[in-house]
Structure formats: structure tokens, C-alpha cells
Amino acid sequence: MLTGQQTTPVRVPDVPETPSGTPRHFIARRRLRERQRLIDVRRTRVNRHWDLNESLELPDESQRLLLRREIRGAASRRAAAAYKASRLTRPITILLGAFVAFTLVARGEFTPTGPASSLIGSYVAGAGAACSLLLVAPITVIATAYSVAPSLRDQFDRWTLYALAGAAPLVFLLFAVINLAPPPAGSTFNPAAASSSAMALSGIALIAVGSLVGHEWLMRHCNARQCRPYDHVALYLVDAAASLHRDRHRWSSDNHVVKWRGMLDVVATQAERDARLTRRIGTTYEGTHSELRDEARRIAAVIRGHKRDLAEAYSASDVEAVATSLICGAQAFCAGDRTALLANAPDQVPQVNRFAAATARITPAVLLIAAGILLPMVPAIGHSGLASSLRWYLISLGVIMFITTRQDVTTKIGEAVAKALFKQ
């Protein structure tokens, strides 16, 4: 025991105390809560993906631990990007809500007068009109895309969202600008009530759809900044492999096989999108971009090739073999090993330009419909008695060609329409 030595006290720098009610205290508490929330989101995402990984029962312990670490990192980065995008979406929602509320207040000269039944009917009529106008655009987009290019069905959700995002502000501004005439005496319909109801419904749709579109754009930006190039496809592969392993004994169920095949199609699309590395090289360097695009198609072809394996599966071991192959792909993506990904890929995959195919499909129908509208306007044709018949014949033939690609069906229906329209 040392007795002759005096201990020099350590001087602690003075830290100004922050009262619990000051703005700095509230900011610190808010940041702490946001940080804890981010940690919770990461933990939930990591646990979910790791539970799926545990169900795969990998034989090599070192590979299992390495894949566990990589999946934890990928899931954490995606969770952080999703949480940041959600935080940045709040100002967009607040601004849209403030705009809609201000417009409703500025336009709100309507005072509810009259019987309750007539007001309710007017409210329902206005909401129905707004709903119909809002649904016209997405239904048209879905019907057109499905009939023209069914191979693009993985993009239907995004197109529908963008169609709603374009229709919602137009419908809202339409009912905000128009001035409906006052109802005649004795009428039970109240145009002002219908307009207010339509504005309210379209305003709610504008806030919801605008927030979703903003969140999607911010999510892409946050993913590009915080995630690695192959995080998404690695998580998709692990999810698909875990689903196959978990339900491998249901190989005889047609519904499960169809679900698995659709899942592989989604994974292949994501793999083709991520393997292009467009965020890193852009599209200006044509040579490198073309090479990476070809390699991405080859990698996606390997994943799509398992769709046939699942369709021909005749035991649980066949399904387990596909799950093992997907796990090997996930490990290669996590390691960034494109050589391993291309080891079993076909040498060449035919490039299918889906947009060019869709354009070639829709062009004849559009030309026929345009000819049906414009040709009767020519004086030599318009003054004849066959102008109306020619118009409807060309339009109907264009619609038929738009709906079906079978030439025999188009010919038979076209002949029947011609006989009905041009008979003397």
C-alpha cells in the first residue's frame, strides 16, 4: 500500500447542464428515439432473413456463418435505407396535405342546406364521379399493358402507381376549378355538395399516391447510397431458397409450383437489373454497358432455368436441389464473384426487346383506328354514303387487332363486320 504518494485529482471539464425543458434536450431525445427505432428496424429485418437462412440447414458451418454475416449486413443496409426514405417522405406528405387543405378551405363556399337525404346522395354522386375518373387511367394502363406486352407484368404495379399519380392531381384540380351551375328549383341534387365530396376524395388520393411515389423515388436514392450493388438480389435469393426448403414436401401441389415459378421470375428480373451495374457505369460507355447487360441476361437465364426444374420436380429432393443452387447464387452475389455466377450460364441469350415487340404489336391497330377517324374527313370519301361504314369498319378492325394476335380470328371477324356494314 502506497502511503507517501499523493494522488492528483483528475480535472473534469465543465459540461454545461442542459435543462430538461430546453430545445436542445428535446432534440437530443428525438435523435435518440430515432436511432433506437432504426436499430429496431434493422434487428427485425436481420432476424427475419436469418430465420429463413437457418431453415436451409447448410452442411458447411463456415459457409453458413459467412452467409449469415453477409445477409445480416445486406438486411441492415436495406433497413437503414428504408427507414431514411420513410423519414424523408414525411415532409412530402405534410406539404401535399397542406396544399389539399388550403385548396379545400379556399374553395369551401358550400354550406350544407337542404334535406339530409339529398345531401347524402350528392356526396355519394360526387365521390363516385371522382373515383371513376381516378380509376380510368390505371385500368387503361393495365389493360393495355396486359394485352400488348404480358411479359411486362412485373412492371404493372409501378405503372399503375404512376398512372394514379398523374390522374389524382388532374381530377383534384378539375373539381377545384370548375363552377357548377346552381340546381334548378325543386331539384334534389346539390352540385356544390357533389363537388366538395369529389374534391375531398381526390385530395385524399393525391396525398396517398404522392407520398407513395415520393417514397419510391427516395427509396431508390437511399438504396443507391447505402446498399451494395447485389444486396437486393442476395436477399431475394435467400428468401426464395428458404421458401423452397420450407415447403419442399409440397412438390406435388400445382399451386405451390406455380407460386415458386413466379417467385423465380421475380428473382431473375431483380438479378438482371442489379447485375447490369447501371448505377456505377451509367449508359454512356456503350461497350462496357453492353457487356454487363449481356452478362446480366445470362445470369438471369440460369435462375429462370430452374423454373423448368420445378415444373418437372417429382420429389422433395428435386426442390431441395433448386434451393441449394439458389443459395450458391446468393453466396456468389454476396462475394461479388461474377465468374462463379457465369460458370453454368448459357453462352448467349437472345435479346428480347419487349418495348420494341409491344410497339410492333400496337402500331397496326393504331394505324387502322387513325385511318378510320381521318379517312372519312377526306371530301371524296366523306360525301359518299359509305363514309360512316368505312369509319366503323376500320375502327372495329383496329380494336380486334389490338385485342388478339391471331390472324384467322381477325380475318373472320373482319369479314363478318364488312358484310354487316357494307351490305346493299
Image (cartoon, rainbow, N blue to C red):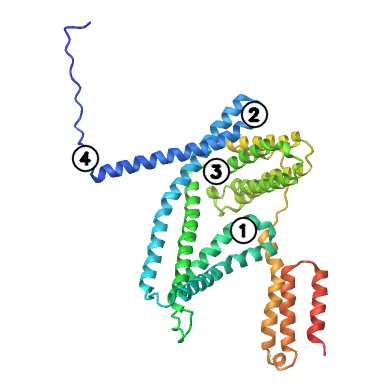
Closer to the eye: label 3 or 2: 2
Residue 229's mark? 3
Q: CA distance from mark 3 to mark 1?
A: 24 Å
Q: Is residue 322 left or right of residue 61?
A: right
Dot 3 and dot 4 residues touching (CB under 8 Å): no
Residue 58's mark? 2
Q: Mark 3 belongs to which amino acid? A: Pro
Closer to the eye: label 4 or 1: 4
- Disc 4 is placed on an element classified as loop
Which comes sooner in the sequence, label 2 or label 1? 2
Which comes sooner in the sequence, label 3 or label 4? 4
Task: Examine the image and state in which quarter residue 55 appears.
Answer: top right
Q: Mark 1 belongs to which amino acid? A: Phe
Q: Mark 4 belongs to which amino acid? A: Pro
- Disc 2 is placed on an element classified as loop
Closer to the eye: label 3 or 4: 4
Task: Examine the image and state in which quarter residue 52 appears.
Answer: top right
Q: CA distance from mark 2 to mark 4?
A: 55 Å
**Residue 420, above or below 106:** below
Coordinates of residue 419 in the picture (x, y in percent): 82, 83
Q: CA distance from mark 3 to mark 4?
A: 45 Å
- Badge 3 crowding class, 10 Å Cα cut-off, few under 14, some 14 to 19, many 20 or more, is many
Residue 19's mark? 4
